[in-house]
Amino acid sequence: MVASGNRQVGRAWLRQALNSALLAIFAQCLSGCYMYNFMKHKSPTSSVSTTFNGTVVGQPLGNAAGGPNEAALAQVYLVGTTHAPAAVRPDPDLFVRRLLRQYRSEGSAVAHQIGKVDQFRLLLGGAPQDFATNPQTTYDATSLLAVSKVADEVCRALVAPNASEHPGWSTILPHPADQEFSNISWMAQRFLGIPSAKIDPAIYPKLQAIMVAEEPIVATNWWAANNPFAKYIVVCSALNLSASSLYH
Amino acid sequence: MNANQLYSRLFRRSQVRSMLAIAGVAATVLITRSAQAAGPDYEMALKRAQYLLHGTVPTDDEYAAVGSDNGSYKSAIRAFLNHSNFYSATLRYHEILFGTGLGDDYLTELVRSDIDNKTNKVAKLSCNRADSGDQRYRCQWSSQNSGRKTGTCPQAWEQAVTVFWYPGMVAWVCPEVMTTCGTDLSQCLIEYSDPAAAKNAELGTTEIFDTHAAVTNSLSKQAAGLATAVVMANYPYTKILESGLTAVDGAIVHFMRQNQYFDMTKFNAAPGLADLIGSIALTDTNFRLVNVGHDPTQAGALSTFGWLRRYEKNRSRANQLYQRLLCRQFTSALPRVFPADPGNLRTTPGCMGCHSTVDPLADFFSTWGEGGELYTGAKASTPSSFDNKSGAGLADLADIIRNDDAFATCTVEHAWGWLMGRAFYRDEADLRRALTSYFVTVNYSFKELVYAMATHPAFIEGSRSDATVTDPLDEPPLGQPPGGNTNLPCSKTIDFTADIAPKLGQCTNCHFAGNKIGRQDISSAAQMKIWGSQSVNMMASGNMPPGQAGPPLIGPVWDLKEAVRCWVAQNP
């Protein structure tokens, strides 16, 4: 009797343990998948390409470098300068990739999209393949021309992608296409890179006016057919061409 | 094509109108920004730091999280340095620092021209997805054999393989392709129809792959990848010149494991390297450090294929090293008339100004061949000297360089230029010295150096200046120990009560009068007269006070050490 009772208790315990384990696995999978998708949507730059593996293959490399030394750092802060930092222009070789990768995960579409504008890289001031010259750090009219063409291409991929060129992509705009003010102000913050509160509201109607004026012309393109977000491409380009977006 | 034609080709008239309107919008925004007064501006600093270190621009929420709070700003900087995005930012920084891009023709000498003693029979595959029909992703022969239509077969014969460059990706191949190239196709050269897309494809994330593009790209970046991996793992930055240390990613591992297209016997990799890389995934985009152990001909980044192949001659290797790692230039007045036969350039007047230094420096590279004979043209090592120190081979040269303060100072200059957008001004010598000392104090942690700069008041400044520095600081001097000369002249008379006693709290927790723990009392001038020299030595070695990361080069311990040292010298 005792043995039988123990077996029953054992079976019940085993059933309970199995149920718990299955539930845990299910919950872990669900949460893991959800977290993966969430991160993928919210932050493509962190979802792909890997976490860095710092282990050394082969012989050990010795001790690591030091961590922060607050006392010594405080002394460094005391040594000042009267000269301001210089404006930094985004690296022309990375500009398109960084813009896309803030919203798109790495993959074939990104490779094709960057490849499409690769011919403009040198005109933008990029470094040649052998690095005979460094990437350009100054801003001039020539690069503005090239950026305009590049901005149009990249903006199409961001705000009005189409299935044949950008399979699997949808617009990055957070609001329905008819909410023009909301979408324009969102783009202004993202592409100018400054806080919304610091953006002069006077630019919104100007951007909207450009958009309205250009809409009939944009609509004639095959990729604009049935795409209510196509009209935003010109606004996206305008903002990306702004010197503020290139000014850090 | 003139500018107008180019312009017309690129833009329609409507776009011209847009651009004019855009200019107006841009001007409006600029007016908003130009109202920014001089002084700390955490928003601008965050925008700049986040773009440079993380590759993104801040959202409203991220701006709000930092506000104008220095602590929150510092936390944001620390988060950028610990994020995986810092890898690509650092890689790009080092690509520019080393400048070792390779053209397509740089691998020519390694390409095989035969297999099985049959000329021009090289296993190349073209992989593409069918536009219509079954839309299968197929890999077929693309070499000269393709003209005879080999490598194609009825669809029913096709077999599915999982390609090595994209896990989970299925490619359909004929049986003979799988026999030759292996079940993951890693034993063949892969070609892709769109070179621009192939050049920009990330290994492991897309079906797009081109062996030549991937290998060239990775070998070009190998020196930068090594330095980046050292930084990310927070090893001392001096390790970028460590003998026997290299770095590989998936494309280089693929390159080294196959023998169908590149002839690896010509590559002459470091002994043991091929065995060590067996565990590294072919899809690993990030560079991994591989340490085969000390080898007198190896010196980390300086012995990577990219560095040695891009800078083909030993003199150019020496010159680039002098510029890029020591921030020094070979400049000398040229002779008015070049002699027809200058003889020994190291001693000929008019030539020796540069060649007396660059030629001995070049001799350290003599164990490597030049140009396309990188591996076959190696010679015996040549005893030489640089910076008044002798050696032979790259390992010795690396030790000379990294034990000179100019290496640390040059690293500070590069990082400063990256973050600040300009060089140091002449009147910023103290700032350069303080940053260099800090870099050495934290045992060459590049991450901590970047943190120190990105959180420095100079970086947080809201106004902007011209990138052209009209009065630049002199290049780093050679021959100083790391951290510079830490024993400065005792120009000021030191008073114990005013200059030492207020700083003694670091020691007198233990070293006070009447302590019962056996510590010497150094709390008074009389006691310091007895124990002053020993105290200086203990502080200078980094042993006291407890918890020092190494010899102090800046900070409160350094200040106390210097005050006591001068006081002892002035009060014998």
Image (cartoon, coloured by chain):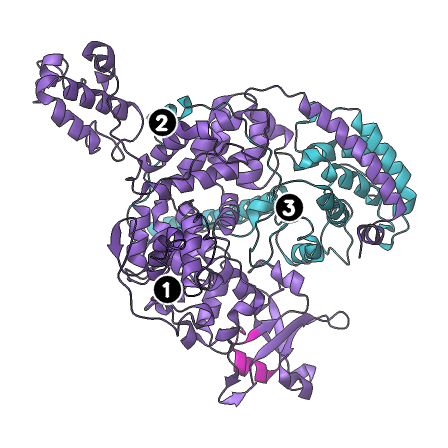
Chain colours: A cyan, B purple
Furthest residue to the top?
B497
Q: Residue at x 37, y 64 (%)?
A: B343
The answer to whether marks 3 and 2 mark residues whose Cβ atoms lie closer than 8 Å is: no
Residue bearing the label numbered 1: B343
| Horizontal relation, residue B497 to residue A53: left or right | left
Query: Where is residue A193 drawn, in percent x and y?
Result: 66, 33
Find the magenta span and give its range. Answer: B174-189
Residue bearing the label numbered 3: A95
Query: Where is residue A23 drawn, in percent x and y?
Result: 50, 47
Q: Secondary structure at mark 1?
A: loop
| Horizontal relation, residue A39 to residue A60: left or right | right
Residue bearing the label numbered 2: A70
Q: Which mark's residue is nearer the viewer, 3 or 2? A: 3
Q: Residue at x 63, y 32 (%)?
A: B59
Q: How many marks?
A: 3
Q: Who is closer to the viewer here, B187 or A82?
A: A82
The vertical placement of A26 against A57, above or below, is: above
The answer to whether residue B530 is visible is yes
Q: 10 Å neighbourhood of mark 1: few (<14), some, or many (≥20)? A: few
Q: Label 2 amino acid?
A: Glu
- Work out how far the residue at label 3 is from the one at label 2, CA to CA, in angstroms: 35 Å
Chain under callout 1:
B
Q: Secondary structure at mark 3?
A: helix
Chain under callout 2:
A
